[in-house]
Image (cartoon, coloured by chain):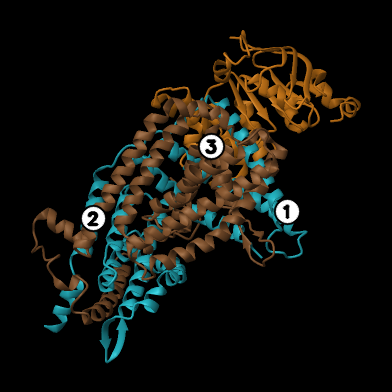
Chain colours: A cyan, B brown, C orange
C-alpha cells in the first residue's frame, strides 16, 4: 500500500521525466493572461467560458500533449469546485431561463460557471507545467526577473524535495513495518518523528553548505541570468495573445446563434 | 486554506498579487541582509522539509481524524520572519504549480493569507512576545506561544479568505456565514497546528537549542534598516488600496469590468464587444443555454480537428526516455 | 612546481560537544603524492580532510597548504587550491542541470563565462559525462552522480584533491570508472576510505588513523601484503 507521501514522490519523479521540452519562454505570461481572461468572465455567462476552452484544446494539441491527457489531469478538481459552488444553487433561486418549462435558476448557472472556471484555469496551468517541467517554470521566472533570493530558494527547495521525501519515506517505512497498519501517528510519536526529520534536514543543509563553501561560495548564489526572448518567442507570444483576446472579447456564442438561425 | 482560481476575481487576485510581490521584494532584501551565509541552503532544505512534513499525519487526540503541520510558526522559530516568509512562499509556489494546490492567479491571495499572516503577523506579534517575554525559556512559553500564534495566524487567514471571496463575488454564500464556517474550522486546525508546532519545537529545544532563531541578534539588524522598509511596505499598501478601490468602482459600473475598461481605453463602444447586450448578464437568458450547448459542440469539433491536424506532433510525454543529442 | 605540499604539525581538533577528534597529528604530504587515509569510523579521517579545506580550523597546531597556514583569513585562497569531493553527491549537486553544478565553483571564482564554460566542458569530458551537461542530477545513475560531483570539483582545477568515501554506494562498473577517472588526475590526492582495494588501486601511501592519532604511515603495498599488520590495524 503506497502512502500519500510515496504517491506524491512518484508523481514528482514522473513529472520531471515528462517535462522539459523546449517551449517558448512566453508561456508563463500567456498562461497568466489566459487565467485573467477566464476569471474575468461574468459569473452568469458560462456560454462565454466554454469558448475559452479553445486555448487548452489548441495548445495541448499544437504542443503535442493531447487534450485527453490534459482533460484527464484536470477533472480531479471537480469535487473541490463543487464544494466551492454548491451554495449557489442552494441559495440563489432567481430564474435564469426555462427549458421547456423546466426552471433553471441563476444559482445553477453560476455553479456551472464555477466548475468551468476552475477546470479551465487548472488546464492552462497543467499545460504549462507539462510542457516545461518545474525547472522550466523556474527558468522562466529567472527570465522575467523574479528576485534571486526567491529563485534560489525555489531551486533548492525543489531540488531537496526529492531527497528529504526519500528520507521521510524511509523513516516512515521503518515505522510502518512496526506499526501494524495504523495510518497516522499518535501526537507524541509524530512530534519525535518530525523532529528527527527536521534535524536530519538541517544536518543535510550543513553538509550542503560545506560543499558550497568548499567550492568558493560566500553567500552570493551564482545564478546566471538567462538571456531574454528571441524572435520566435515574441511571435508565439503575440500569436497566443491574439487568440486569447479574441476568445475573450468576441462573443462567439452570439455569432454562432446568428449563424444557426440564418 | 488554499484558494482555487475559481474562487477569485482577477481584481481581487491582482490586488493581493501586488501586495504579495511587494512583500516578496522586501523579504528578499531582508534575507540578503542576514549575516549567516548558511541561510541559503538552510532555507532551501527547510522548504523541502515543510513540504514533506505536511504529508505525514498525526492523530488528533480524542478524535479519529488526523491533521498535519502547516509550518509558518515553526519556520519563524527556526529562521526568523523574512526567511520564513520566503520559505513558505516557495512551498506555496511549488504546491500551486505541481499539485495544483491553490490556483496560479490566486497565488497572491494564498501568499498573503497563509505565508504573510503566519510568518509576518501572528508569529512576530504573538509567538515572539510570549517566547522571549521573560528570563529563561520554559517549555510552557513554547506551548502557549505556538498555539496562540498558530490559531491567530490561521484565523487571520480565514478572515482574509472570506473577505477575498466576498469581494470576488463568486459564491452566493453570504459573508457572515462563510466567515463563521471558515473561522470555526480554522480554530480547530489552528489548535492542532499549534500543538504540533509546540511538540516539534520542544523536541528541537531539548535536542539542539542552537537551531532556534536568536531574536536578540536579529533586533540590531532590524533597527538599522527598519524605517526604509516600512516605507516600501506602506507604498505597497497604498497601491493595493488604490487598486482595490479602482477595481471595485469598475466592477460596480459594469459587471464585466474588463470589457468596460478596454472599451474606455480604446474609446470605441462599437467594438463589437462591449455593446452586444447578451454579454451583460441580464437579458436574453435562453441564449445562455443555447450558448452552452453550441459551445460544447464546437469545442468537441475543435478538439477533433486539432487532434487530427497535429497528430504527428504527439510527443511521448509519458515515456521516460528523452532525446538527447 | 612543488609548493603544493600539505603539512600538519601537531594538529588537535575538538568539537563543540567536547569530542576530541584529532589529538596531535603530524604528517607531510608532498606534491603529486596519493595518500589513502584509513581507519575506523570516528578515527578522525573526515575531520582531517575538513581541516585541509579550511572548513574547520585547528584547535591547536597548524595545517599548511603550500606555504599558507589554514586560518579563516586564508580560507578562500586555500579552497581555490584544494578541491573536496564529499561523501554524498546529493549534497554537491543542487543546481538545475549538471552543467550548472560543474560551473558553480568557477562562477564563484568570478571567472569570465567563456573560461567557466571551458573548464566545465573539460571537467565533464574528463569524467565521461561529456554530453550529459543539460541533464538534471536525478536523471543520472548513482555512478554518474558521483562522476558529476567529482567534475564539479575538477572544474576548479585544484592542486590537491580530497575525496571522502568515493566508492560508497557504487556498483562494480561505476567503481572501475571512478578508478580510471582518479588515475587520470595528476596532482595530489588524499582519499579517505574503508575500501582497501580502491585505496591500493589509486594510492601509493597509506596513513592509518586511530583515535585521532597517526598509527601507521607506510607504502600501501607493504600494508596490503602484510595480513598480520592489517589485522592489527583492524582494517
The residue mark sitting in front, 3 or 2, is 3
Pinpoint the chain carrying mark 2: A
Marks 1/3 in contact by CB < 8 Å: the verdict is: no
Q: Position of residue B225 (x, y in %)?
A: 42, 27
Question: Is label 1 on the same chain as label 3?
Answer: no
Q: What residue appears at the point 68 percent right and 34 percent down from the top-left corner?
A: B136
Residue B315 visible in the snapshot: no
Residue at the outermost front position: B134
The residue mark sitting in front, 1 or 2, is 1
Q: What residue appears at the point 50 percent right and 39 percent down from the top-left corner?
A: B81
What element does badge 1 sit on?
Answer: helix
Query: Against A163, is C63 above or below?
Result: above
Q: CA distance from mark 1 to mark 3?
A: 27 Å
For disc 3, the neighbor class at 10 Å (few under 14, some 14 to 19, many from 20) is many
Marks 1/2 in contact by CB < 8 Å: the verdict is: no
Disc 3: which residue:
B80
Q: What residue appears at the point 43 percent right and 72 percent down from the top-left corner?
A: A82
For disc 1, the neighbor class at 10 Å (few under 14, some 14 to 19, many from 20) is some
Pinpoint the chain carrying mark 3: B
Residue A189: numbered disc: 1
Q: Position of residue B322 (x, y in %)?
A: 46, 52
Frontmost residue, B223 versus A123: B223
Residue A35, by quadrant, is bottom left
Apparent side of residue A83 relative to residue A104 in the rendered image (left or right) = right
Q: Position of residue B276 (x, y in %)?
A: 13, 70
Residue A241: numbered disc: 2
Frontmost residue, B245 versus B311: B245
Amino acid at each position: 500500500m503506497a502512502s500519500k507521501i510515496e504517491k506524491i514522490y512518484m508523481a514528482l519523479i514522473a513529472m520531471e521525466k515528462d517535462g522539459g521540452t523546449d517551449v517558448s519562454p512566453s508561456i508563463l505570461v500567456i498562461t497568466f493572461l489566459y487565467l485573467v481572461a477566464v476569471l474575468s468572465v461574468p459569473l452568469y455567462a458560462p456560454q462565454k467560458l466554454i469558448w475559452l476552452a479553445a486555448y487548452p484544446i489548441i495548445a495541448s494539441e499544437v504542443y503535442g500533449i493531447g487534450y485527453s491527457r490534459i482533460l484527464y489531469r484536470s477533472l480531479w478538481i471537480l469535487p473541490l469546485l463543487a464544494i466551492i459552488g454548491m451554495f449557489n444553487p442552494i441559495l440563489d433561486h432567481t430564474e435564469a431561463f426555462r427549458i421547456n418549462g423546466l426552471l433553471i435558476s441563476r444559482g445553477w448557472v453560476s455553479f456551472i460557471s464555477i466548475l468551468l472556471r476552475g477546470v479551465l484555469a487548472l488546464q492552462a496551468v497543467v499545460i504549462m507545467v507539462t510542457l516545461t517541467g518545474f525547472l522550466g517554470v523556474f527558468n522562466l521566472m529567472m527570465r522575467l526577473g523574479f528576485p534571486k533570493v526567491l529563485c534560489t530558494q525555489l531551486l533548492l527547495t525543489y531540488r531537496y524535495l526529492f531527497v528529504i521525501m526519500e528520507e521521510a519515506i524511509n523513516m516512515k517505512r521503518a515505522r510502518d513495518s512496526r506499526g501494524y497498519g495504523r495510518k497516522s501517528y499518535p501526537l507524541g510519536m509524530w512530534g519525535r518523528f518530525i523532529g528527527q526529520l527536521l534535524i536530519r534536514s538541517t544536518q543535510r543543509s550543513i553538509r550542503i553548505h560545506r560543499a558550497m563553501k568548499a567550492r568558493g561560495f560566500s553567500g552570493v548564489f551564482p545564478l546566471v541570468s538567462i538571456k531574454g526572448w528571441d524572435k520566435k518567442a515574441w511571435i508565439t507570444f503575440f500569436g497566443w495573445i491574439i487568440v486569447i483576446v479574441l476568445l475573450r472579447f468576441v462573443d462567439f456564442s452570439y455569432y454562432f446563434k446568428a449563424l444557426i438561425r440564418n | 486554506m488554499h484558494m482555487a482560481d475559481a474562487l477569485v476575481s482577477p481584481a481581487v487576485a491582482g490586488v493581493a498579487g501586488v501586495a504579495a510581490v511587494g512583500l516578496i521584494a522586501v523579504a528578499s532584501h531582508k534575507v540578503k541582509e542576514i549575516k549567516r551565509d548558511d541561510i541559503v541552503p538552510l532555507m532551501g532544505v527547510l522548504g523541502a522539509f515543510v513540504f514533506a512534513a505536511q504529508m505525514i499525519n498525526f492523530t488528533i487526540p480524542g478524535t479519529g481524524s488526523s491533521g498535519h503541520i502547516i509550518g509558518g510558526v515553526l519556520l519563524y522559530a527556526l529562521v526568523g520572519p523574512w526567511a520564513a516568509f520566503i520559505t513558505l512562499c516557495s512551498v506555496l509556489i511549488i504546491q500551486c504549480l505541481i499539485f495544483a494546490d491553490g490556483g496560479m492567479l490566486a497565488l497572491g491571495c494564498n501568499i498573503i493569507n497563509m505565508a504573510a499572516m503566519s510568518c509576518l503577523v501572528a508569529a512576530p506579534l504573538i509567538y515572539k512576545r510570549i517566547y522571549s517575554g521573560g528570563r529563561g525559556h520554559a517549555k510552557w512559553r513554547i506551548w502557549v506561544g505556538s498555539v496562540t500564534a498558530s490559531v491567530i495566524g490561521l484565523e487571520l487567514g480565514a478572515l482574509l479568505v472570506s473577505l477575498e471571496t466576498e469581494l470576488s463575488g463568486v459564491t452566493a454564500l453570504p459573508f457572515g456565514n462563510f466567515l463563521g464556517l471558515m473561522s470555526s474550522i480554522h480554530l480547530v486546525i489552528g489548535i492542532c497546528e499549534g500543538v504540533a508546532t509546540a511538540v516539534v519545537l520542544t523536541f528541537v529545544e531539548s535536542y539542539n537549542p542552537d537551531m532556534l532563531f536568536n531574536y536578540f541578534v536579529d533586533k540590531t539588524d532590524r533597527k538599522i534598516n527598519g524605517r526604509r522598509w516600512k516605507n516600501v511596505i506602506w507604498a505597497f499598501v497604498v497601491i493595493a488600496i488604490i487598486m482595490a478601490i479602482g477595481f471595485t468602482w469598475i466592477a460596480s459600473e459594469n459587471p464585466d469590468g474588463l470589457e468596460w475598461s478596454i472599451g474606455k481605453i480604446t474609446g470605441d463602444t462599437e467594438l463589437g464587444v462591449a455593446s452586444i447586450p447578451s454579454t451583460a448578464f441580464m437579458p436574453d437568458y435562453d441564449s445562455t443555454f443555447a450558448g452552452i450547448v453550441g459551445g460544447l459542440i464546437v469545442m468537441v469539433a475543435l478538439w477533433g480537428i486539432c487532434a487530427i491536424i497535429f497528430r504527428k506532433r504527439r510527443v511521448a510525454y509519458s515515456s521516460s526516455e528523452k532525446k538527447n543529442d | 612546481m612543488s609548493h603544493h605540499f600539505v603539512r600538519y604539525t601537531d594538529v588537535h581538533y575538538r568539537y563543540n560537544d567536547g569530542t576530541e577528534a584529532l589529538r596531535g597529528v603530524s604528517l607531510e604530504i608532498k606534491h603529486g603524492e596519493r595518500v589513502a587515509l584509513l581507519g575506523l569510523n570516528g578515527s578522525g579521517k573526515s575531520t582531517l580532510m575538513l581541516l585541509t579545506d579550511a572548513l574547520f580550523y585547528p584547535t591547536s597546531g597548524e595545517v599548511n597548504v603550500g606555504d599558507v597556514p589554514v586560518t579563516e583569513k586564508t580560507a578562500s585562497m586555500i579552497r581555490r587550491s584544494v578541491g573536496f569531493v564529499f561523501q554524498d553527491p546529493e549534497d554537491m549537486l543542487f543546481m538545475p542541470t549538471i552543467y550548472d553544478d560543474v560551473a558553480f565553483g568557477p562562477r564563484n571564482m568570478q571567472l569570465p563565462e567563456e573560461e567557466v564554460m571551458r573548464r566545465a566542458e573539460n571537467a565533464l569530458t574528463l569524467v565521461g559525462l561529456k554530453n550529459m551537461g543539460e541533464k538534471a542530477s536525478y536523471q543520472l545513475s548513482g555512478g554518474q552522480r558521483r562522476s558529476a560531483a567529482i567534475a564539479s570539483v575538477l572544474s576548479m582545477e585544484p592542486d590537491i584533491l580530497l575525496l571522502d568515501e568515493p566508492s560508497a554506494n557504487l556498483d562494480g562498473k561505476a567503481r572501475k570508472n571512478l578508478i580510471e577517472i582518479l588515475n587520470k588526475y595528476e596532482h595530489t590526492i588524499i582519499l579517505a576510505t574503508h575500501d582497501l582495494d580502491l585505496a591500493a588501486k589509486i594510492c601509493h601511501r597509506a596513513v592509518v588513523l586511530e583515535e585521532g592519532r597517526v598509527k601507521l604511515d607506510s607504502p600501501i603495498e607493504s600494508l596490503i601484503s602484510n595480513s598480520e599488520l592489517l589485522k592489527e590495524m583492524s582494517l
